[in-house]
């Protein structure tokens, strides 16, 4: 039987595109976690801000929860609709709305893919420098809602640094215009920054003004093979001191194993325990000399055993594939993912403690490490054995995640570096935030969403 609430929504917003087919509900009701069974009421695909506002007002009147949806590439269950919520997908709101050449601001709708934003910026001779492997499928609205970081945080920072303004529809259907592109605006609270990383719990992002940067300099890409975990931070410090680093990424031999099995080319004849992909600005002969000097220093110190320098854009792309292809290569193995961060100065001590913890608690599992060492962010992927039931696997992983959260707390770290809290990390939020902070966050949420209809159950319970 058709749900009467859906009929009332269609009557209230006649132009709104609605989908109730079971295949659509299953497709739009989950993100990359794939841990929950999707069960949304329906999927709404608004075409403009007015339709978003009208849908929110209907939801408030009907008492229906809304799950905002972008590219659904998240890894924390933030876009899951498993309890009869209305999925509000922004995929039709995917256009570039304007460009201001004086302020270097590109205004876009939230459903536009990150890669399309980057292409639009290049079309104006500029760059939108936030970048990660899911660039073709993730959307700018989701990037903002989780303050996504990625592979170039070392040079350019997180998404937050590139948001000049936002338009946000609150839980009452009101439209807020936040930031407005002003470089300086010391007139009270900056609500724009509250909306960033709020995971759809404070409002629905319906428009974003993005700051653009000058085109990046010419760069070179270097792949290094390391004999031990302990040398990782020494290599980072040596390269940072000698080169203008754009990115510094590491991964383990197990990560390389899976990427090569997925179709990438092995970079060395012999295996090594750890690898680093570094990208750095390199202009002329002086840049080449500095690069070779840095490499030779690391080899002389015993921190590096081998290396490959990308001699062309094609070779650089092949080297980057070894890092960027990890997530895709692990997907068939049902990974349980940890996305954690500590201050860079705390990284050596945390690495030692975390490595000991996981070796002790996961002796029977394939554990794949990779991450953005240059900004203190690690991704820890635990792969499910084929003969282990998923519920039992998740239960074991959650027990260890609780121990990992305590280790992070002891080192002043965060249980979520860039994927958000969502459903997956919610039980561990108090390892990162104090009770007083969480109480303040709840108060802010009530102010912008008094009925609690926006992405309920995510981040924390009401």
Image (cartoon, rainbow, N blue to C red):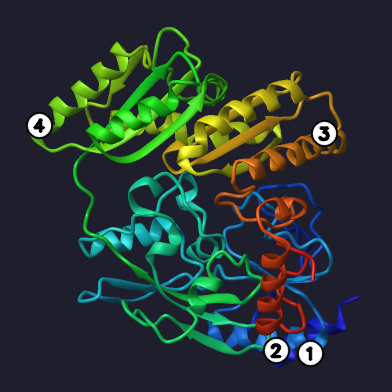
Q: Quadrant of residue 209?
A: bottom left
Q: Are marks 1 and 2 in contact (CB under 8 Å)?
A: yes
- Residue 37 in picture, x, y percent from top left: 82, 53
Q: How many marks?
A: 4
Q: Gap in Å between the C-alphas at discs 4 and 1? A: 66 Å
The residue under the point 26% across, 18% down is 297
Q: Are marks 3 and 1 in contact (CB under 8 Å)?
A: no
Cα distance in 3D space between marks 1 and 2: 6 Å
Which of the marked residues, 3 or 2, is nearer the chain's N terminus?
Answer: 2
Mark yes or no: residue 397 visible: yes
Can you identify the residue that label 2 sits on?
Answer: 57
Q: Which mark is residue 286?
A: 4
Give the Cα separation between the discs numbered 2 and 4. 61 Å
Lower sequence index among marks 4 and 3: 4
Expressed as whole percent of the image width and height from the top left, the position of residue 42 reads 76, 71
- Label 1 SS: helix
Question: Residue 396 got which mark?
Answer: 3
Circle 1 packing at 10 Å, graded few (<14), some (14-19), many (20+), is few
Residue 61 image label: 1
Does 417 sit above or below residue 400? below
SS at mark 4 in the image = helix
Separation of residues labelled 3 and 1 (CA atoms):
42 Å
Residue 7 picture location, percent across and down: 80, 85
Residue occupying the point 51% across, 60% down: 147
């Amino acid at each position: 039987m058709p749900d009467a609430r859906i009929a009332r929504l269609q009557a209230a917003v006649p132009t709104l595109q609605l989908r109730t087919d079971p295949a659509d509900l299953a497709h739009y009701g989950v993100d990359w976690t794939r841990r929950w069974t999707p069960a949304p009421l329906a999927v709404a695909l608004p075409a403009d801000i007015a339709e978003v506002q009208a849908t929110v007002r209907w939801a408030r009147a009907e008492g229906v929860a809304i799950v905002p949806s972008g590219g659904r590439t998240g890894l924390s269950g933030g876009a899951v609709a498993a309890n009869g919520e209305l999925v509000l997908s922004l995929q039709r709101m995917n256009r570039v709305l304007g460009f201001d050449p004086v302020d270097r601001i590109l205004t876009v709708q939230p459903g536009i893919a990150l890669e399309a934003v980057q292409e639009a910026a290049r079309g104006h001779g500029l760059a939108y420098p936030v970048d990660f492997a899911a660039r073709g499928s993730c959307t700018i609205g989701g990037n903002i809602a989780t303050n996504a970081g990625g592979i170039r945080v070392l040079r350019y920072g997180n998404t937050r640094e590139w948001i000049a303004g936002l338009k946000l529809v609150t839980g009452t259907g009101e439209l807020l215009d936040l930031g407005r592109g002003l470089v300086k605006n010391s007139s009270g609270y900056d609500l724009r920054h509250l909306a960033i990383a709020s995971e759809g719990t404070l409002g629905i992002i319906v428009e974003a003004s993005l700051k653009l940067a000058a085109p990046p300099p010419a760069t070179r890409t270097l792949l290094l093979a390391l004999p031990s975990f302990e040398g990782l931070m020494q290599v980072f410090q040596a390269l940072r001191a000698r080169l203008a680093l754009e990115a510094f990424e590491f991964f383990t031999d197990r990560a390389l194993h899976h990427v090569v099995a997925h179709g990438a080319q092995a970079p060395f004849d012999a295996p090594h325990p750890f690898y680093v992909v570094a990208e750095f600005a390199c202009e002329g002969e002086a840049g080449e000399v500095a690069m070779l000097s840095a490499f030779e220093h690391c080899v002389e110190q015993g921190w590096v055993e081998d290396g490959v320098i990308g001699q062309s854009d094609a070779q650089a792309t092949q080297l980057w594939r070894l890092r960027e292809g990890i997530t895709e290569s692990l997907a068939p193995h049902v990974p349980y993912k940890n996305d954690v961060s500590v201050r860079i100065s705390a990284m050596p001590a945390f690495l030692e403690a975390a490595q000991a913890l996981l070796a002790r608690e996961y002796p029977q599992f394939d554990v794949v490490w990779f991450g953005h060492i240059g900004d203190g962010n690690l991704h820890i992927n635990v792969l499910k054995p084929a003969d282990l039931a998923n519920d039992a696997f998740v239960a074991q992983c959650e027990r260890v995640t609780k121990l990992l959260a305590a280790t992070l707390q002891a080192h002043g770290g965060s249980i979520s570096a860039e994927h958000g809290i969502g459903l997956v990390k919610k039980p561990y939020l108090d390892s990162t935030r104090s009770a007083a902070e969480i109480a303040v966050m709840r108060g802010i949420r009530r102010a912008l969403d008094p009925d609690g209809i926006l992405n309920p159950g995510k981040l924390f319970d009401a």
